[in-house]
Amino acid sequence: MKILLAEDEKSLSRALTVILEKNHYSVDAVYNGTDALDYAMLNDYNAVILDWMMPGPDGLAVLKKLRAAGRTMPVLMLTAKAEVDNKVEGLDSGANDYLTKPFEAKELLARIRAMTRQSSAAPDTRLRFGNISLDTATFELAGPSGSVTLPGKEYQMLEMLLRHPGHVISADRFMEMVWGLESDTEQSVVWVNISVLRRRLEAVGADIEIKVQRGLGYAARKKK
């Protein structure tokens, strides 16, 4: 399962990321409300953990914008605010649950399990474009000639392309969304993964391709 963690206290974010990954979750960690909103709008997360007090738009503002945009993924609010009125405000704004700091890791994990159980009845987890589909729950790419489960980075890049077919996505945007704002990874890794994804698409018999627009970026388009 894929989780977005938006927590501006970096030591806490790192600790939570370790805990979540040890419990078999894939984690994207961001540290402000602007990035949290961008990531949540572009990716199909199984759950989002939002700290209330973040730089930029705070967690509550991010939550309201997500719900206004029709994003229905379960959201857990993290906050030092323990007053009942704050909890009510968060829940009324669309949060699925609310956890007050400090908290035990096992309680956080239990609340995530409860939230994702409730949302597991979603009718379809597949993105479709042309004759292929990408399952956002299993990371499986499928086409008329077969299927393959994509590694995390390849999956995230293809998901971005399929959510915005025909739209050009720059290498900088891929670096920011897939490798993270603080990554020291060379940008050439984007081209390497694009090359691998092109081979994956050919292998499953896709009638779409990833086109490069020189100097601008990449887009998923139907083959002519």
Image (cartoon, rainbow, N blue to C red):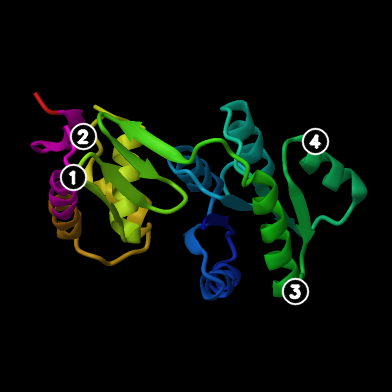
Residue at (16% x, 40% y) in the render: 205
Residue 53 can be seen, yes or no: no
10 Å crowding of disc 1: few (<14), some (14-19), many (20+): many
In the rendered structure, are the residues bearing label 1 and label 3 in contact, judged by CB atoms less than 8 Å apart?
no
Alpha-carbon distance for marks 4 and 1? Answer: 43 Å
Name the residue that disc number 4 marks: 92
Mark 2 is surrounded, within 10 Å at the Cα level, by few (under 14), some (14 to 19) or many (20 or more) other residues, namely: many
Disc nearer the start of the sequence (4/1): 4
Tag 3, which secondary structure?
Answer: loop
Compared across the picture, whether 107 is left or right of 166 comes to: right
Q: Nearer the viewer, mark 4 or mark 1?
A: 1
Which residue is labeled 3 in the image? 104
How far apart, in angstroms, are the residues tagged by discs 3 and 2? 43 Å
Q: Which residue is mark 1?
A: 201
Of the image marks 4 and 3, the number of the one nearer the N terminus:
4
Residue in the image at 53% along x and 76% along y: 22
Q: Residue furthest right?
A: 84
Mark 1–mark 3 Cα distance, whole angstroms, equals 43 Å
Give above or below for 221 relative to 98: above
Which amino acid type is marked by label 3? Answer: Glu
Camera-nearest residue between 85 and 45: 45
Q: What residue sits right under mark 2 in the picture?
A: 219
